[in-house]
């Protein structure tokens, strides 16, 4: 097969683009160029991936494509955690605590599958069980526990870049106003197909301008204090769009405590009052963080904000013809960009291969 040029926007930097590039680069016959405004190492409000916890805590609903994508991703994360510690992924016990007074809140709705006593993933992740009444902390009505993973995104994103480089993927910085500008990237390149992994910025990119993609603002605090297990609550007493979770990143990445899920909010700066509430809730939910002491004993590395690219109707994985170009979209994963990354990338790669095969026969 003749080599095809596949240029991907947002491939390089975001978890969606990098994973898609990596899977596609395993097939022969493609010249893949990754072109993006932000790359691993950058911290920017337009770039969600570095801010994620990130853990595997499926919020997808039973019987949906999203559940299939999450299921496919677990297999790979499991393999990476067992055999590739250099990827920055490790296993951690995960406990999801449910409070009946959170029913109907934004966080509880987002977590609805997680809060069920028999979620679809109970036979996928290891060591799933429902806690007995006498194991429940005060104020908690029910809880589940399983073995999950936590990803140190500061290691994992560069690791994905390294794997792509091994497979001869080319990386370039570029900012596109319109999706068709990719054709002008390099006069020596005739672009056959573009994979669009622009995340939240798909809402602003010319030719896409998907108004159903909105931010769900997540504020976090990264601390040096250690937590042996991940803890997630169904809600808080501090408002509908606030959350409480704790997770320890692999390989000295610190412990991430969160958070919030503020839909439609683009504010990039941490709110100090919210930060105090986040720290208080974390210390209460996980006293081992500070040995039972107050938030003044949290050793803060950084306060931060990231914007989850939430799309009404879920992640868009579709192909589209624009003029002479095929476009394959893979954006809008919301708060699940890591835990669905391999499933989504596999689906996008299938569309890429199908589109280019049709083109070859034309
Ligand atoms: P991004 O990471 O935003 O990447 C988009 C890329 O496109 C960038 O490289 C950008 O430069 C490029 N780009 C965009 N527009 C243009 C343009 N016009 N020209 C050139 N380049 C462009 N997910 C989980 O699975 N588990 C978690 O525990 C988790 N926790 C989270 C916690 C927080 C606080 C946040 C904010 C998110 C969390 N997420 C989690 C969600 C996850 O981070 C996102 O779903 C994921 O990072 C989205 O990745 P992406 O590649 O689609 O987008």
Image: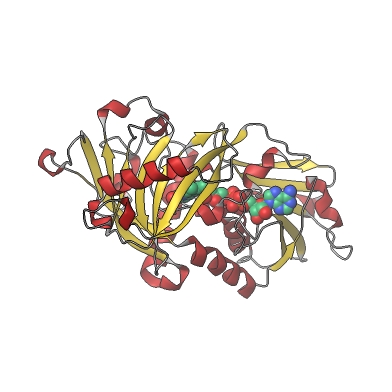
Residue at the farthest bottom position: 166
**Residue 355 visible (yes or no):** no
Q: Quadrant of the N terminus?
A: bottom right
Expressed as whole percent of the image width and height from the top left, the position of residue 140 reads 21, 36
> Would residue 224 be found to the left or right of residue 192 on screen?
left
Expressed as whole percent of the image width and height from the top left, the position of residue 221 reads 43, 52
Q: Number of callouts in the render?
A: 0
- Compared to residue 77, the image places residue 266 above or below, namely above
Expressed as whole percent of the image width and height from the top left, the position of residue 200 reads 63, 43
Residue at the farthest left position: 134
> Would residue 150 be found to the left or right of residue 315 on screen?
left
Residue at the farthest top position: 104
Expressed as whole percent of the image width and height from the top left, the position of residue 345 reads 57, 53
**Residue 2 visible (yes or no):** yes
What residue sits 52% from the left and 46% below the top?
A: 270
> Would residue 316 be found to the left or right of residue 8 on screen?
left
Q: Depth check: 201 or 301 in front?
A: 301
Q: Depth check: 69 or 250 in front?
A: 250
């Amino acid at each position: 097969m003749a080599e095809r040029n596949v240029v991907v926007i947002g491939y390089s930097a975001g978890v969606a683009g990098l994973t898609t590039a990596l899977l596609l680069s395993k097939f022969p016959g493609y010249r893949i160029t990754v072109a993006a405004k932000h790359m691993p190492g950058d911290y920017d409000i337009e770039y969600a991936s570095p801010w994620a916890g990130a853990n595997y805590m499926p919020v997808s609903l039973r019987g949906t494509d999203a559940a299939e994508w999450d299921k496919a991703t677990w297999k790979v994360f499991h393999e990476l955690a067992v055999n590739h510690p250099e990827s920055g992924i490790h296993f951690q016990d995960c406990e999801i605590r449910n409070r009946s007074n959170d029913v109907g809140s934004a966080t509880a709705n987002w977590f609805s599958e997680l809060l069920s006593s028999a979620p679809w993933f109970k036979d996928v992740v290891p060591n799933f069980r429902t806690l007995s009444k006498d194991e429940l902390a005060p104020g908690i009505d029910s809880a589940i526990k399983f073995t999950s993973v936590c990803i140190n995104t500061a290691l994992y994103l560069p690791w994905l870049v390294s794997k792509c480089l091994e497979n001869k993927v080319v990386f370039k910085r570029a900012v596109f106003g319109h999706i068709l500008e990719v054709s002008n990237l390099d006069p020596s390149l005739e672009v056959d197909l573009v994979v669009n992994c622009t995340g939240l910025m798909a809402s602003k990119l010319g030719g896409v301008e998907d108004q159903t993609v909105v931010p769900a603002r997540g504020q976090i605090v990264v601390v040096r204090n250690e937590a042996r297990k991940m803890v997630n609550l169904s809600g808080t007493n501090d408002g509908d769009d606030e959350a409480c979770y704790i997770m320890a990143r692999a390989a000295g990445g610190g412990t991430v405590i969160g958070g919030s899920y503020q839909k439609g909010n683009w504010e990039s700066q941490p709110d100090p009052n919210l930060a105090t509430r986040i720290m208080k809730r974390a210390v209460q939910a996980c006293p081992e963080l500070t040995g039972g002491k107050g938030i003044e004993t949290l050793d803060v590395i950084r306060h931060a904000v990231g914007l989850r690219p939430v799309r009404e109707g879920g992640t868009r994985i579709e192909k589209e013809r624009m003029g002479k170009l095929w476009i394959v979209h893979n954006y809008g994963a919301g708060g699940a960009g890591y835990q669905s990354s391999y499933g989504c990338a596999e689906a996008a790669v299938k569309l890429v291969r199908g589109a280019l095969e049709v083109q070859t026969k034309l």
